[in-house]
Image (cartoon, rainbow, N blue to C red):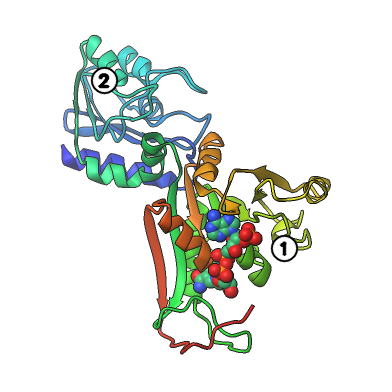
Amino acid sequence: MHHYMEHALSLAVRTMAYTSPNPRVGCVIVKDGHIIGEGWHNGPGTDHAEVMALKSVRGMVQGADVYVTLEPCCHYGRTPPCTEALIAAKVGRVYIAHLDPNPLVSGKGVQMLEASGIIVEHGFLSDAAEKINRYYLHFMRKQRPYVVCKWAMSLDGYMTTAKTDDRQISSLESQQHNHLLRHQVDAILIGYNTALLDNPQLTTRFFQDGIEARYPVRLVLDSRGQLPSSLTIFSPDLPGKTIVVTTSQSSLAWRNACEDANIEVWIVDSVDGRVSLQHLMQCCYAKRLLSLLVEGGRTVHEAFFRENLVDEVRAYIAPVIIGGMIRKK
Ligand SMILES: NC(=O)c1ccc[n+]([C@@H]2O[C@H](COP(=O)([O-])OP(=O)(O)OC[C@H]3O[C@@H](n4cnc5c(N)ncnc54)[C@H](OP(=O)(O)O)[C@@H]3O)[C@@H](O)[C@H]2O)c1
């Protein structure tokens, strides 16, 4: 039994990056000890894993066992409910890794299957399934994005070097690793100083193979509206979108200039003169951004920790000692 659920989990991760704001789901259909169908969800508007698996079936599906990594949906969205498809196919049993906390489903999918005489069991390899879907599950349960704080640091704990210091804290390997993470999240966030001093692109690059890059939304915190539109992140040639998150302290003239330059601006509450991270989380929730990668700098990381908003940390520790030779602003 676990073997089939493991296979369903391996299908769920096939589209690690593309399903948001939907969950990652895999499904295997088994009859007489043989896998007769399999499917996975490829993203919004495409077949759900159960439907793809049913369509792929070779032979008679009636009475078959279905292994699915998430509770089948029971509501009409961009596609019809999976419960209807499973009931119409007259499957015998449905094994589910874990229930879907989405209030539109949340146990109702199981109830509908059971009401049609299908035997349902759940709780198979649920820990592994929860890990795969941690962005989605967190978003549904906590009504805010899953936050990953990422930084590169020296052995002695510095995140920056002096301007004249050509030693790198990050390596090609760490960049490749981080860009794969960028590829998987819905948004990246940096602070005002990082935007100004590093002038980064915040795009998804450094892939070794032919993965089609996904470009998360770039959020930059600028409480007083002072960032110049000449920064790289505002370039119209850059793939993806940049949003400046500001407060009512920013001037109307600056906001109008942003509008003229096609730069999206979010005005959020201010706390102690800075962007309210809690309010920003609410905005991200409203925009259905399931995951947020915070890329610094230190001040922004500290603020996320202070607000108890950090769900995961990716720290790249380089074998260099900076020894206090940090960059002066
Ligand atoms: N090693 C790494 O992984 C890494 C990564 C990124 C950056 N860096 C380095 O870090 C340095 C910049 O770091 P930093 O600490 O000086 O600045 P930062 O974290 O990049 O930006 C801090 C600024 O963001 C703005 N901000 C708005 N709302 C905020 C909030 N709620 N909480 C915190 N900040 C908020 C504030 O400016 P306003 O009040 O004007 O809005 C604040 O001064 C750069 O030298 C960069 O090279 C290193």
The secondary element bearing badge 2 is classed as: helix
Ligand 1 in which quarter? bottom right
Residue 296 vs residue 92, the one in the foreground: 296
Residue at image location 51% in from the left, 49% down from the top: 277
Of 10 and 242, the residue lying toward us: 242
Q: Name which residue type carries label 1.
A: Thr
Report the residue marked by disc 2: 110
Is 179 positioned to the left or the right of 242 in the image?
A: left
| Mark 2–mark 1 CB contact (< 8 Å) | no
Q: Which is nearer the N-term, disc 2 or disc 1? A: 2
In the rendered structure, find residue 232 and report the number of the disc placed on it: 1
Q: Quadrant of residue 80?
A: top left
> Label 1: few (<14), some or many (≥20) within 10 Å?
some
Q: Is residue 202 visible?
A: no
Q: Position of residue 318 (x, y in %)?
A: 42, 80
Query: Residue at image x 28%, y 22%?
Result: 107
Q: Which mark is residue 112?
A: none
Along the horizontal axis of the image, is 36 left or right of 234?
left
Q: Quadrant of the N terminus?
A: top left
Q: Is ligand 1 closer than 8 angstroms to the Cβ of mark 1?
A: no
Q: Residue at x 49, y 45 (%)?
A: 278
Residue 12 x %, y %: 36, 41
Q: Amino acid at mark 2?
A: Val
Of residues 184 and 43, the one drawn nearer to the viewer in this rendering: 184
Say whether residue 166 is visible. yes
**On the rendered image, what quadrant is the C terminus found in?**
bottom right
Tally of numbered tags = 2
Circle 1 sits in a helix, a strand or a loop, which is it?
Answer: helix
